Amino acid sequence: MAPADKYCRNCKGPMRLFVELSPAERALAAERDDVDPGTLDGYRRCSTDSCRRVQLYFNKSKGFNLPERLGWPNRE
Ligand SMILES: [Zn+2]
């Protein structure tokens, strides 16, 4: 699945670009009780500045906010 424009619960408004999780973000998602391990590959992170929303590609109601300490490893 390529990055895609999806609705972000945090940002609202226009669609936002969601990108693949970094290894650190993925590890954090895997530790969560509310993330089904079978769906881990489907999670993407909102690429908008100041937003830490991670959500399931096909179900925006499934998601969480990253802790701020992870920073933005995917940013160029
Ligand atoms: Zn967002």
Image (tube, helix red, strand yellow):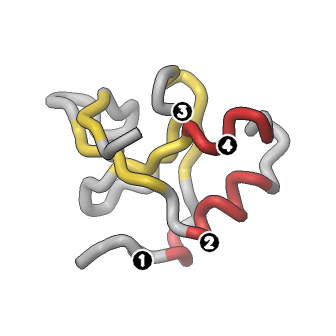
Q: Which residue is mark 3?
A: 56
Q: Secondary structure at mark 2?
A: helix
Under mark 4, the amino acid is: Leu
Ligand 1 found in image quarter: top left
Indicate left or right for 49 with 53 as reference.
Answer: left
Measured Cα–Cα span from mark 2 to mark 4 = 13 Å
Measured Cα–Cα span from mark 1 to mark 3 = 20 Å
Q: Which mark is residue 40?
A: 4
- Name the mark nearer the viewer: 4 or 1: 4
- Residue at image position (15%, 30%) is 14
Q: Which mark is residue 73?
A: 1
Q: Check disc 1: other Cα within 10 Å, few if <14, some if 14-19, many if 20+.
A: few
Measured Cα–Cα span from mark 1 to mark 2 = 9 Å
Q: Secondary structure at mark 1?
A: loop
- Judging depth in this view, the residue of 1 and 69 nearest the camera is 1
Circles 1, 2 touching at the beta carbon (< 8 Å)? yes
- Judging depth in this view, the residue of 63 and 37 nearest the camera is 37
- Residue at image position (79%, 48%) is 32
Indicate left or right for 53 with 8 as reference.
Answer: right
Under mark 2, the amino acid is: Ala
Circles 4, 3 touching at the beta carbon (< 8 Å)? no
Q: Secondary structure at mark 3?
A: strand
Quadrant hosting residue 12: top left
Q: Quadrant of the N terminus?
A: top left
Q: Which mark is residue 24?
A: 2
Measured Cα–Cα span from mark 3 to mark 2 = 17 Å
Q: Which of disc 4 and disc 2 is earlier in sequence?
A: 2
Measured Cα–Cα span from mark 4 to mark 3 = 8 Å
Q: Which of disc 2 and disc 1 is earlier in sequence?
A: 2
Q: In the image, is residue 15 above or below residue 44?
A: above
